[in-house]
């Protein structure tokens, strides 16, 4: 009886031990599982870093320096009073700048740019209404001597210098030509110095105000009136009128001549013609090289001819705008070579080379002896 009781107690003890061992093992596995959330926390930091990077990427690197060492991070536009020195800073060790182009054109000494260790500084003293425009900066990336603009680290702000006496941004041009093309929008650039000013567009003949529907014709104070799909009906003389709550009388802008153009872009379309292709000794003749093209497309001419470098000739280049078809404006560019007191060396082929930004075209004609 005692033996049976002893065996029973021994079996119970073994069961208890196995249960404790299994429980300890299960606790260990649970402990291992608790390590995994720690790994998840490490992974969880990655999206936060991405969000931070995205935030930095979207932030402006362009700031305005205010009084008492304060800084203003700039957005799309900013309105300032003229006369007070403006200081802008752009964060980076190698910075490029852009600003209203006329400040470069006239070599304006009011503008200064200085690169410091961690930022670049732009200072404009005595700003006026004419300085209204876009100011931008960007990080310059260099690999040896080759440098490029970092498009992802660029900031731009349009700054208005709100002059109550100058409602339109002043221009050195008092009569500007605007070319209208059927395949691209056109802009009448009557920009204002205050985005709150009301502006209207007017045609001189017939005298009328042009309806602005926000679609076909819209207005942007940073650019002017934008015509989306120009047509011959839009050609003519125009001006803009600005009304201010401070002024009793409206202010009129520069005048604009809108010309309709329909000339295909490409290398010069050139022709050549001699006053006579058969000449005698002692005669005088000329050869005209003509290019028809876009009104603002510059064309350069060069000649190759018999006796070049040995015989004196005169060459005259010119251009003018002409009307072709119904309301179409074209630029005619010409180069004329004149040969006086013909000699035997002057007979042969005359080649005119015409060149624009799209390419080069050669045309030629031959001058022969009459005998």
Image: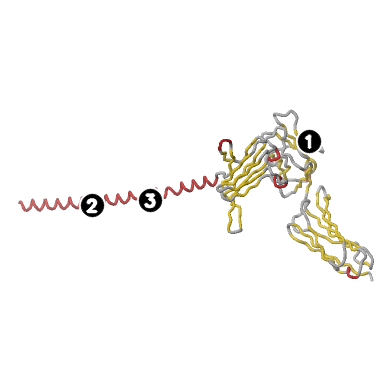
Residue 251 drawn above or below residue 5: above
Label 3 to label 2: alpha-carbon separation: 27 Å
User: Which comes sooner in the sequence, label 3 or label 2?
Assistant: 2
Q: Residue 22 — which label?
A: 2
Comparing labels 3 and 2, the label whose residue is closer to the camera: 3
Q: Residues within 10 Å of mark 2 (few under 14, many from 20)?
A: few
Tell me where residue 367 appears, x and y as whole percent.
88, 67
Looking at the image, is mark 3 or mark 1 nearer the viewer?
3
- Quick check: 51 left or right of 72? left
Vertical comparison of 344 with 359: above or below = below
Q: Which residue is mark 1?
A: 208
Which mark sits nearer the N-terminus, 3 or 1? 3
Q: Quadrant of the C terminus?
A: bottom right
Q: Which residue is mark 3?
A: 39
Q: In the orientation shown, which residue stands out farthest toward the bottom? A: 371
Label 3 environment density (alpha carbons within 10 Å; few <14, some 14–19, many ≥20): few
Q: CA distance from mark 2 to mark 1?
A: 97 Å
With respect to residue 190, does 92 lie above or below? Answer: below
Tally the numbered discs.
3
Q: Are marks 3 and 2 in contact (CB under 8 Å)?
A: no
Disc 3 + disc 1, Cβ < 8 Å: no
Say whether disc 2 or disc 1 marks the residue closer to the N-terminus. Answer: 2
Please tell me whether mark 2 sits on a helix, a strand or a loop. Answer: helix
Q: Are marks 2 and 1 in contact (CB under 8 Å)?
A: no
Front residue of 228 and 53 = 53
Q: Residue at x 8, y 52 (%)?
A: 6
Residue at image position (81%, 49%) is 329
Percent of width and height locating residue 45: 43, 48
Residue at 77%, 59% in the rendered image: 355
């Amino acid at each position: 009886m005692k033996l049976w009781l002893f065996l029973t107690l021994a079996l119970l003890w073994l069961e208890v031990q196995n249960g404790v061992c299994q429980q300890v093992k299960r606790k260990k596995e649970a402990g291992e599982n608790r390590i995994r959330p720690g790994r998840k926390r490490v992974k969880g930091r990655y999206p936060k870093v991405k969000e931070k990077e995205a935030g930095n990427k979207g932030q402006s690197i362009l700031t305005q320096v205010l009084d008492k060492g304060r800084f203003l991070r700039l957005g799309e536009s900013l309105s300032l009073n003229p006369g007070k020195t403006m200081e802008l800073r752009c964060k980076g060790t190698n910075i490029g700048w852009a600003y209203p182009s006329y400040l470069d054109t006239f070599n304006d000494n009011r503008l200064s740019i200085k690169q410091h260790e961690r930022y670049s500084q732009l200072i404009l003293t005595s700003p006026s209404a004419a300085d209204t425009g876009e100011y931008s900066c960007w990080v310059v990336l260099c690999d040896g001597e080759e440098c490029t603009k970092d498009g992802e680290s660029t900031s731009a702000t349009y700054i208005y210098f709100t002059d109550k006496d100058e409602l339109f941004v002043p221009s050195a041009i008092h009569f500007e030509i605007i070319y209208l093309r059927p395949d691209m929008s056109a802009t009448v650039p009557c920009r204002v110095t205050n985005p709150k000013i009301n502006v209207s567009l007017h045609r001189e003949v017939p005298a009328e105000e042009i309806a602005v529907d926000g679609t076909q014709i819209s207005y942007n104070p940073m650019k002017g009136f934008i015509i989306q799909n120009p047509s011959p009906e839009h050609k003519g003389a125009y001006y803009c009128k600005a009304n201010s709550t401070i002024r009793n009388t409206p202010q009129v802008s520069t005048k604009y001549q809108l010309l309709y153009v329909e000339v295909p872009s490409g290398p010069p379309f050139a022709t050549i013609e001699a006053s006579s292709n058969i000449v005698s000794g002692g005669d005088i003749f000329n050869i005209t090289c003509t290019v028809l093209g876009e009104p603002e497309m510059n064309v350069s001419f060069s000649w190759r001819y018999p006796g070049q470098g040995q015989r004196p000739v005169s060459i005259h280049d010119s251009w003018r705008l002409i009307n072709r078809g119904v309301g179409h404006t074209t630029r005619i560019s010409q180069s004329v070579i004149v040969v006086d007191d013909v000699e035997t060396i002057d007979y042969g082929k005359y080649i005119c080379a015409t060149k624009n930004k799209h390419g080069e075209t050669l045309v030629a004609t031959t001058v022969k002896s009459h005998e």
